Amino acid sequence: MSTAVDVDAGELAGLAAATFPLACPPTSPPAAIAAFISANLSPERFAEYLADPSRTVLAARTGGRIVGYAMLIDGAGTDPDVAEAITMRPAVELSKLYVREDSHGSGVAAALMGATVAHASRAGARCLWLGVNQKNHRAQRFYGKHGFAVVGTKTAPMGPHLEHDYVMALRL
């Protein structure tokens, strides 16, 4: 596991474009998914994320290729539903944790989660939190297996469509 650097932006964007749709429920409009990827997961956006001191991007590599990544953001953000659900501070958000489909079941996601928890703990966080789509049962089981519990709900816009998420938290 390593911290991603600016030269990784393009590879991370390619991985994000391939993996983000896997986490979306079948009811998500394909055009909204594509627009979200274009607006939020482009190489330019990853360059911004990597330069942002409040964010950390961890990369899992196999054979020199990035096969998974996790993005952490300091704090609980500004969403009022999240603020109500996340009462332990300081907090770190696990904004993204994605693994290439051909690496599912290989232990990469568990290793990324371990590195994420270790990073948040070293940063002094009392809580690690995330939002997960209410229809993404596979991800919910994964997070639950790692000690996360549902503490609230929030909505997340994807284009004109609203997605409904659980807010899950892990006490550190």
Image: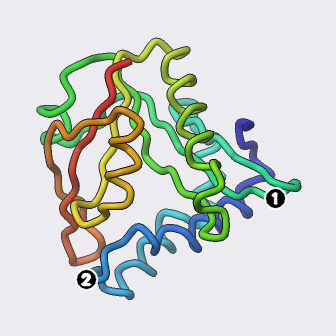
Relative depth, front residue between 49 and 103: 103
* 66 w.r.t. 32: above or below: above
Q: What is the quadrant of residue 119 in the picture?
A: top right
Query: Residue 127, position in %: x, y?
Result: 34, 23
Query: Residue 52, position in %: x, y?
Result: 57, 38
> Looking at the rendering, in which quadrant would you find the C terminus?
top left
Query: Residue 55, position in %: x, y?
Result: 53, 36
* SS for dot 2: loop
- According to the picture, the residue beneath numbered tag 2 turns out to be 27
| Separation (CA) of disc 1 from disc 2 | 32 Å
* 125 w.r.t. 162: above or below: above
* SS for dot 1: strand
Relative depth, front residue between 35 and 106: 106
Residue at image coords 74%, 37%: 2
Kind of residue indicated by mark 1: Arg
Q: What is the quadrant of residue 29 in the picture?
A: bottom left
Mark 1 neighbour class, 10 Å CA radius: few under 14, some 14 to 19, many 20 or more:
few
